[in-house]
Amino acid sequence: MKKSKNRSIGLLAAVAVALIAHSARAQGTLSYSTGDLLLGFEKSGVTANYVIDLGPASYILGLSGSTNLTTALSLGNIAADLSGTFGGGWATTGSVGTNVQWGVIGGTSKTSNGLFGLPKNTILLTLGELNVGTHSAAPQTYSNSAQLGINNQIQSLGAAINNLTVTANSTKAAWDSSGTWSSDAPSSGAFGLTYGIEQPASGTYIGPANSVLDLYELQPSLTGTGIYEGSFSLDSSGNLSYIAAVPEPSTFASIGAGAAFLALFRRSRKLQHA
């Protein structure tokens, strides 16, 4: 009897701890900082957006190879959230205008250089691949003043989602009932750009689980184009992945030259101490 009573007390204590933990998590909020990459989802006819703060862009830019961001960033159950926002068929490709669309954007400091080693008003954004496996064409860059305007809109989005209550499935995501993400026209003239940052609205790759988005770094310039950094993909289970760009041959040559120099330097030191 005593053993059974102790077990009941232990069970009640465990339940209490779980409820407290769940309550604490449910009361958590998003904490946006300048330079964070924001991943937004929208669907025509649905006012609410689903927004994930992926954290500092420096982390993404520092990756190599392929990374499951859902695991690496502890993003939680994205699929459950997407189902709750857009319905259980969120990953299913349907007719034009009925699909969930997604994109990524972020901006550096508006006033000073040096954040992540990038010039002020550098913009990071995605473009959907028209044919999966073939990179999208590098987007144009804009003047510093034009990118300042874009950056202002990005940081206004960050301010709008900052302190939103996180979902029960993710500490990095929230529902934006005001539709701030979609109001910035991410599928067309996103954040004052002349193009959209989400996947194509028509064609083979219009469903979120079928599409691949290329990430570009846009440093302010009137004559330049964005630098390809890597690609995001999302599967029907809600796993977000990122594949970093493979360094150019010239980069490999520089790495090789540096390694060769280091080897010669070490050999010279060994001979000196022989």
Image (spheres, rainbow, N blue to C red):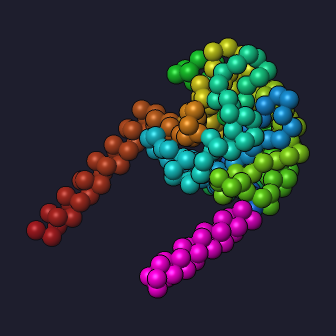
Image quarter for residue 111? bottom right
Q: Is 5 inside the magenta-drawn segment?
A: yes
The answer to whether any part of residue 92 appears in the image is yes
Residue at 89% x, 45% y is 178
Residue 165: x and y in percent read 78, 58
Residue 67 place in picture, x, y as percent? 48, 44
Q: Where residue 107 sits: x, y (%)?
A: 74, 48
Vertical placement of residue 215 versus 21, above or below: above
Direction from residue 265 to residue 274 in the image, left or right? left
**Residue 103 place in picture, x, y as percent:** 70, 36
Say which residue appears at 67% left-offset and 14% top-offset.
203
Q: Which residues are magenta?
A: 1-28
Q: Nearer the viewer, residue 45 or 42?
A: 45
Magenta highlight on residue 155? no
Q: Is residue 141 visible?
A: no
- The quadrant of the picture occupied by the C terminus is bottom left
The residue positioned 50% from the left and 37% from the top of the image is 243
- On the picture, is 77 further left or further right than 191? left
Going by the image, does 106 lie left or right of 156?
left
